[in-house]
Amino acid sequence: MESESDRVPKAFPNLPLPTLGGKQFWTDHCWQAGWRLQHNAVTGHWRVLDDHNVRRGWGNRAACEALIAAQAPRTELVDDHAVILLHGLMRSATSMKGLGDAITEAQIGTPICFEYASTRRSVADHASALRDVVRSLPDDARLSFVGHSLGNIVVRHAIADWQSTDDQLTLQRLERVVMLGPPNQGAGIARQLARTGLFEVVVGRSGMQLGPDWSDFARHLATPPCPFGIVAGNLSETIPQNPLVDSAGDLVVTVDETRLDGAADFLEVACLHSFLMDDPGVQEAVVHFLREGRFPRP
């Protein structure tokens, strides 16, 4: 909860030092021409990174918002289209960079790799931050999302939030959603691992929501109201399956767990869960879906 003092700008002395961009502990709340406003899930402080991941300032939120508004360049999107990429559990935005490069090369939009502290907060918290990032973009920007694993659940939660507040300004701008290995029906492997007792310590609240808490949590998720496609990994004919996964899949999420009624297209690929976004064929399929609303045919 924001206090009165939080609204008074308070900046700390800063040296413009390079950073890793925020991994596991940092969540983006604003994106402006590659500059990012980030919040630390452990210390609670805020910082501003430029488009080269150099820290330009830090302090409370008010001070950092003022800094990014004053110093960051104006956002200009390719074809007025923001393609927001969301990484999975225990990963970082860097994992989506290769896919972002493919989108840049195709000139179909501006890729924005959303960073969030996946193991440190709930899916609702991640979705709230994602909504902040969308709010920071131009009001006329078309919006598409490409998620890997948990990232898709964050998108579905954000859409449900927009629907619950009747945010038509945002909902009407949704163009496409591409889901890579999405646990749309929860994750059986998470339910199995949760029995160890260490699972929640390692993966946090979000991991538990995909597993033992799924039945209560799933009602907070929406089906995208725009064309969406699903890419599922299926290695059943190439390597032995994970004993913690009860049917064909990518060794983490089963094909059946990825399914969601209403999908415009569905694609199975022989690829491990962790590398779906790096597979050249998957990258080609994502670009094709963003452009055409369907996956390419053989």
Image (cartoon, rainbow, N blue to C red):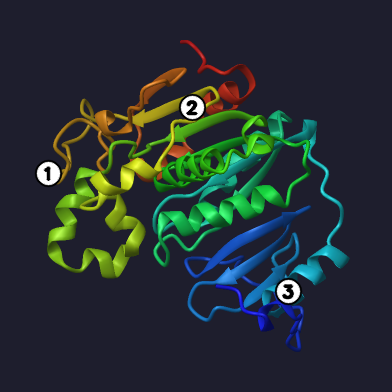
Question: Toward the viewer: 296 or 281?
Answer: 296
Q: Which percent across, then down, holds residue 166?
A: 59, 38
**Which residue in the protein does label 3 denote?**
62
Q: Residue at x 56, y 43 (%)?
A: 165
Q: Is residue 38 visible?
A: yes
Identify residue type, mark 2: Gly
Quarter location, residue 240: top left
Q: Residue at x 31, y 48 (%)?
A: 217
Work out how far the residue at label 3 is from the one at label 1, CA to CA, in angstroms.
Answer: 49 Å
Report the side of 186 relative to 139 (left or right): left
Q: Is residue 55 visible?
A: no
Name the quarter where the N terminus is drawn. bottom right
Estimate how packed mark 2 is, as few (under 14), some (14 to 19) or many (20 or more) residues with alpha carbons within 10 Å. few
Question: Toward the viewer: 160 or 185?
Answer: 160
Q: Residue at x 61, y 17 (%)?
A: 292
Choose the circle earlier in sequence order: 2 or 3: 3
Quarter location, residue 72: bottom right
Question: Toward the viewer: 135 or 147?
Answer: 135
Estimate how packed mark 3 is, as few (under 14), some (14 to 19) or many (20 or more) residues with alpha carbons within 10 Å. some
Identify whether 50 is placed above or below 2. above
